[in-house]
């Protein structure tokens, strides 16, 4: 990569890093100070705060990874360094995605309205269901990180064989095993994507039914329930869009394992990868009444913007 390309990559990476740290740091600061003053915290605030913390760690990992690739490429490509970065990234990445999915499920069960017994059973136990999902997310994140250990063992074998120049049928078999393990590693992203899509469609159907009921009753369709539906749908759609973009960037970055001469493509993938944890925090801020009010007051330079006492109707 040329000097200009490295400079552009660093500027974009650092800019997204700063924006992501400001957005996620703001969420942690507001929710943390609110919990400290009121001694109580809602389940949605717990999820949002932990999501912001995981994004902060993820942004640091991506920044360190980018700096090492640009200035210390040989150190970055060493097995031990790459393994440590990838394990920490994998755990934080999957935990972040699952926390965003838990938030989608929470909004869906709180806002959507269906008479199906299964949905009602989940709705009545929404707190327990979401807490169990969070615990499951921790276990799955650990499992996904530990799966890299086997993948790196295969990678070490491949590197050793390639270094000797003895490319045999055994080498080709091991290379195929590595590709299979690498592809299977990306499948960890499918379950949260499916759950988020299900939450989105349930909210869409619920909003449609609610709108029809409001029309039949002759009342205005712009009530609190409709607005809550629309806000939750916007947040989930934004998450799905950014997540798909993030997943595409991850696949582009991962292609460097198999396709030679893809350094520029890998840099572009790294930049796009940082866009998801950096930008989604602002989507959450604008979709949450408390965070949005605090953020607006801070931008307007109004004193005491961290003081509680505002009116907070239920909203995502």
Image (tube, rainbow, N blue to C red):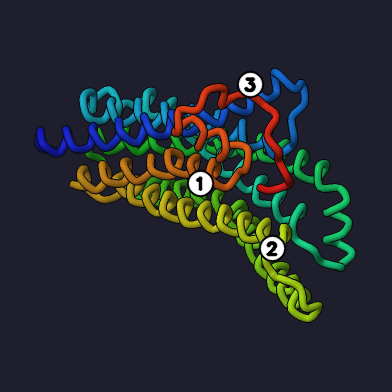
Callout 3: few (<14), some (14-19), or many (20+) C-alpha neighbours within 10 Å? some
Q: Quadrant of residue 201?
A: bottom right
Cβ–Cβ below 8 Å for labels 3 and 2?
A: no
Q: Eyeballing the image, is 140 above or below 108?
A: above
Quadrant of the frame with the N terminus? top left
As drawn, the label of residue 283 is: 1
As drawn, the label of residue 9 is: none
Q: CA distance from mark 3 to mark 2?
A: 30 Å
Residue 224 is situated, as x and y percent measured from the top left of the image, at: 72, 57
Q: Quadrant of residue 34?
A: top right
Callout 2: few (<14), some (14-19), or many (20+) C-alpha neighbours within 10 Å? some
Q: Residue furthest front?
A: 302
Left or right of 312 in this view: 196:
left
Q: CA distance from mark 1 to mark 2?
A: 19 Å
Residue 81 is situated, as x and y percent measured from the top left of the image, at: 37, 23
Residue for point 48% across, 47% down = 181
Callout 1: few (<14), some (14-19), or many (20+) C-alpha neighbours within 10 Å? some
Residue 162 at least partly seen? yes
Cβ–Cβ below 8 Å for labels 1 and 3?
A: no
Residue 227 is situated, as x and y percent measured from the top left of the image, at: 66, 59
Q: Residue furthest top?
A: 36
Cβ–Cβ below 8 Å for labels 1 and 2?
A: no
Q: Which residue is mark 3?
A: 33
Q: CA distance from mark 1 to mark 3?
A: 21 Å
Residue 173 at least partly seen? no
Q: Mark 1 falls on what kind of element?
A: helix
Instruction: Mark 1 or mark 3: name the one nearer the start of the chain.
Output: 3
Observer-nearest residue: 180 or 237? Answer: 237
Q: Eyeballing the image, is 237 above or below 140?
A: below
As drawn, the label of residue 226 is: 2
Left or right of 263 in this view: 17:
right
């Amino acid at each position: 990569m040329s000097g200009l390309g490295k400079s552009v990559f660093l500027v974009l990476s650092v800019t997204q890093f700063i924006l992501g740290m400001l957005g996620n740091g703001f969420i942690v600061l507001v929710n943390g100070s609110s919990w400290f003053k009121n001694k109580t915290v809602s389940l949605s605030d717990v999820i949002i705060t932990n999501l912001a913390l995981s994004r902060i760690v993820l942004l640091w990992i991506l920044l360190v990874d980018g700096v090492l690739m640009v200035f210390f490429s040989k150190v970055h490509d060493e097995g031990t360094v790459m393994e440590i970065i990838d394990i920490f990234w994998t755990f934080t990445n999957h935990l972040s995605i699952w926390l965003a999915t838990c938030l989608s499920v929470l909004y869906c069960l709180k806002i959507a309205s269906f008479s199906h017994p299964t949905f009602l059973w989940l709705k009545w136990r929404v707190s327990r269901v979401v807490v169990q999902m969070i615990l499951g997310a921790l276990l799955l994140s650990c499992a996904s990180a530990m799966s890299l250990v086997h993948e790196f063992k295969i990678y070490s074998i491949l590197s050793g064989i390639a270094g000797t120049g003895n490319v045999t049928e055994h080498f080709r078999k091991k290379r195929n095993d590595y590709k299979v393990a690498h592809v299977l590693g990306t499948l960890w992203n499918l379950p949260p994507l499916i759950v988020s899509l299900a939450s989105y469609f349930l909210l869409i159907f619920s909003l449609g039914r609610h709108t029809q009921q409001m029309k039949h009753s002759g009342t205005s369709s712009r009530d609190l329930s409709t607005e809550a539906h629309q806000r939750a749908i916007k947040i989930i759609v934004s998450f799905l869009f950014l997540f798909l973009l993030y997943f595409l960037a991850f696949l582009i970055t991962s292609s460097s394992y198999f396709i030679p001469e893809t350094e520029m493509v890998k840099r572009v993938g790294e930049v796009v990868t940082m866009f998801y944890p950096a930008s989604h925090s602002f989507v959450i801020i604008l979709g949450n009444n408390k965070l949005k009010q605090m953020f607006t007051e801070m931008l307007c330079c109004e004193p005491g913007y961290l003081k509680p006492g505002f009116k907070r109707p239920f909203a995502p």
